[in-house]
Image: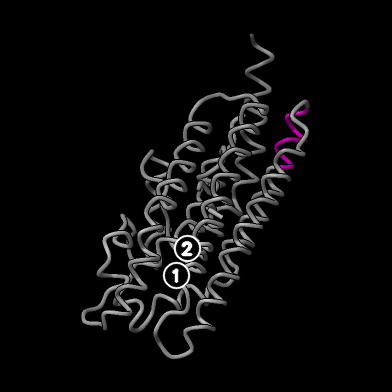
Amino acid sequence: MMKKLALALSSSAALVLTLSACGDDSQAQTDEWAKNVCDQVQPQVAQIQAANAAITDASAGDRSPAEVQEADSAAFQDISEAYASLADAVEAAGDPPVDDGAQLREDAVSELRAISDSYAELQQTVEGLDTSDQAAFAEGLQGVAGQLQELGQSGDAALNELQSGELGEAMARQEGCQGPAEAPSDASEDAGTETEGESEGGGSESGEGGDESADAGEDAENQSTENQSAENEDADQPSGTELEGANG
């Protein structure tokens, strides 16, 4: 029920992975700046992917609403902290030695902190859902899916700008930024396929994951109905991170 919701988170995780770009030569100072940032990228991406995996696990079995709530809350917290750490890394690296470097850094830091705050708000929303009523819980998940969709569709222009041109080329040469991310435009679709199957929770760019999360509410309601029927005879929701997982 939460698999599609998890997709939304995966797409947001792609905002981090998008720091990987391709290119060739660049000046030593630019490489040094890129290394300072990229050394911090891999650990945070790993944290986001681990959160996505936790969501997948929670959605794989017949979990109670309370269990799903706990898993999602923990995942959202991990993702929020990961983006905050990325913001700290970019800020600590100082102004990149390129034209308008100060503005690039300021915009990227603001964008990363905004994403972090958004996931912190999602954590609070999930924690506030009523787990005693499966129908109400499923409806609440629809609201979470909507917020994830909005987050997935939110702008990531500053991050895109940061990883373009000389900086993008320098980042592409750094091991820390050469993560398991695929091309931004295809990532979300791949993430969707992998999630439903079981794979890595890492994603693609915001747009595609947001679309998937829009259907999460319906899945949540359907699952809720199935869970209720099962109980009469004797909740699945994405836990934290595939939720979008690690999508948005």
Q: Residue furthest bottom?
A: 99
Label 1 sits on residue: 93
Expressed as whole percent of the image width and height from the top left, the position of residue 31 reads 29, 75
Label 2: which secondary element = helix
Seen at 39% across and 84% down, the residue is: 97
Q: Is residue 203 above or below residue 158?
A: above
Label 2 sits on residue: 89
Is 138 contained in the magenta span? Answer: yes
The residue stretch that appears in magenta:
133-140
183 horizontally vs 233: left or right: left
Expressed as whole percent of the image width and height from the top left, the position of residue 24 reads 21, 79
Q: Which mark is residue 239?
A: none
Seen at 74% across and 41% down, the residue is: 139
Q: State how many labels appear.
A: 2
Expressed as whole percent of the image width and height from the top left, the position of residue 186 reads 37, 63
Pick the quarter of the image with the N terminus: top right
Find the distance from the CA under tag 1 to the CA under tag 2.
6 Å
Expressed as whole percent of the image width and height from the top left, the position of residue 42 reads 37, 54
Decide which of 154, 28 is in the foreground and name it: 28
Decide which of 221, 130 is in the foreground and name it: 130
Q: Residue furthest top?
A: 234
Seen at 59% across and 31% down, the residue is: 236
**Which image quarter: residue 169?**
bottom left
Give the dominant element type of the magenta stretch: helix, strand or loop: helix
Residue type, mark 1 in image? Ala
Pick the quarter of the image with the C terminus: bottom right
Is 70 contained in the magenta span? Answer: no
Q: Are marks 1 and 2 in contact (CB under 8 Å)?
A: yes
Label 1: which secondary element = loop
Seen at 55% across and 46% down, the residue is: 243
